[in-house]
Image (cartoon, grey):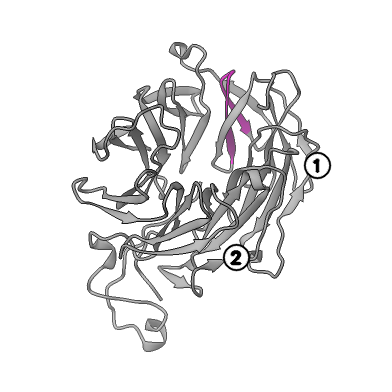
Amino acid sequence: MKKHLYYRSLLALGIAATISACHQHNDVNPDDDALEHKFIRVMVSDEKTTDLSYVNPRTGGVTFEKALFPKSALYTTASGRFGVLVHREDNYVQAFDSGFEQHSDHVDVKGTPKWAAIAGQGKLPTHFKSKGNEVIIFNDGDGTLDIAQESDFHSTDAKMKAINAGNVAHHGAMTKFDNGTYAITEKDGSVAGTLPERVKIVDASGKQIAASTVQTKGIHGNASDGKVALFGSASGVLVVEQTGTQRLIPHPAEFGAAWFGTILEGGNTFVGYTAAMGAYMIDVANNKITPIVVNKDIMQCKVDYAGNVLVVLLHSGEVQLYNIKTNQLIKSGTILPATDKAETQKPQIEATSKYLYVTQPKSGELVQIEVANFANSQKIKVSTTPYRLAIVGIESSEEH
């Protein structure tokens, strides 16, 4: 899980000019004001056009870039510097550079916002992960992985590198461990459809390091803290350690046929989500699953940008914020009109420590709502039919 640290500014201490040229020290802390952090941006893709809205939420300013294709899924690299556009149906992956790079206690600006040169052209690229300096894409069309290093994103004609793990095509997923190996799903054909049943561990060449030891009835959704990876499955939560050890954590008895199709991670805390039941904390060490919010009306369930808060948006328009470490409700309130469950394109939500951001597909707007005061909100005009959004940048206002 990416970590975006919230840096406090330092008081002026009369530091020599050679040092002060590299750091900004003010008596007023810019991170203490009510506005969004200076180095946060919001990217919004469009369902029907190639417009990519690049929003500065501190000023409300919007610039429009042109993606190669419409209806792209949006993600953020672990560093926060790049936004990644995954065009599944068009077999293409793009990256957009915010230019913001964390450097000690401040943020450096590396040029102007622009498209990176890197391109991914795997078959049906779908599942995204980012760890350290690396971006990883699972290609549903042939079961391969595509990887790339952020340091290569601006190299001329840069292409993502394929890793062939000997898989057949399936709707798969993967994680990367701290030791450099990958946990990757595989399909053995024991379950009908495109979902995989097993997970194996491979190295960067695709060579198997540890075989699957647990067969499930279908896998979807995963997360990792680098030491252990969790996969949602119809048989329970599949736990895969980087040593190759595997086991299942059983679902609560009241789940019946329900299971977690989404696994979220904040720090070393894991959250399982299923629309059929709600959101639950997964205690890997004690093989325990505990409810956070039991509700069948959840429209979106996300972890905020810093990985500290679980954001639950209901179809009713109510949002609930939970401390992901303590499983305690922080606050709740209605921020939107109700959304019909039958709507095919629903509002999408993301959050920083200061603000919630919600797309409005019918009005072409991005709603910005202050976490400290839900009544403080504004609408920012973006593209005509906003589809997905992602936050990029650093939660800081300290600059070079």
In the displayed structure, does residue 312 sit left or right of residue 44? Answer: left
In the displayed structure, does residue 171 sit left or right of residue 379? Answer: right
Q: Residue at x 70, y 56 (%)?
A: 160
How far across and down, in percent of the image, does residue 384 sit? Answer: 41, 51
Q: Which residue is mark 1?
A: 207
As rendered, which of 343 and 275 lies closer to the eye? 343
Q: Which residue is mark 2?
A: 116
Q: Amino acid at mark 1?
A: Lys
As rendered, which of 56 and 213 lies closer to the eye? 56
Numbered label attached to residue 316:
none
Question: In the picture shown, does residue 94 fall above or below 227?
Answer: below
Q: Evaluate whether residue 177 shows in this view.
A: no
Q: Residue at x 31, y 76 (%)?
A: 25
Quadrant of image for the C terminus? bottom left
The segment highlighted magenta reads 227-240
User: Gap in Å between the C-alphas at discs 1 and 2?
Assistant: 30 Å
Question: In the picture shown, does residue 221 fall above or below 33?
Answer: above
Q: Amino acid at mark 2?
A: Ala
How far across and down, in percent of the image, does residue 190 sit? Answer: 73, 18
**Prevailing secondary structure class for the magenta stretch in the rendered image:** strand
Decide whether residue 235 is among the magenta residues: yes
**Crowd rating for badge 1 (residues with CA inside 10 Å; few <14, some 14–19, many 20+):** some
Q: Residue at x 51, y 52 (%)?
A: 49
**How many discs mark residues in the rendered view?**
2
Question: In the picture shown, does residue 374 fall above or below 17?
Answer: above
Q: Earlier in the sequence, mark 1 or mark 2?
A: 2
Decide whether residue 175 is among the magenta residues: no
Q: Secondary structure at mark 2?
A: loop
How far across and down, in percent of the image, does residue 5 sit? Answer: 41, 57
How far across and down, in percent of the image, does residue 198 sit? Answer: 69, 26
**Crowd rating for badge 2 (residues with CA inside 10 Å; few <14, some 14–19, many 20+):** many
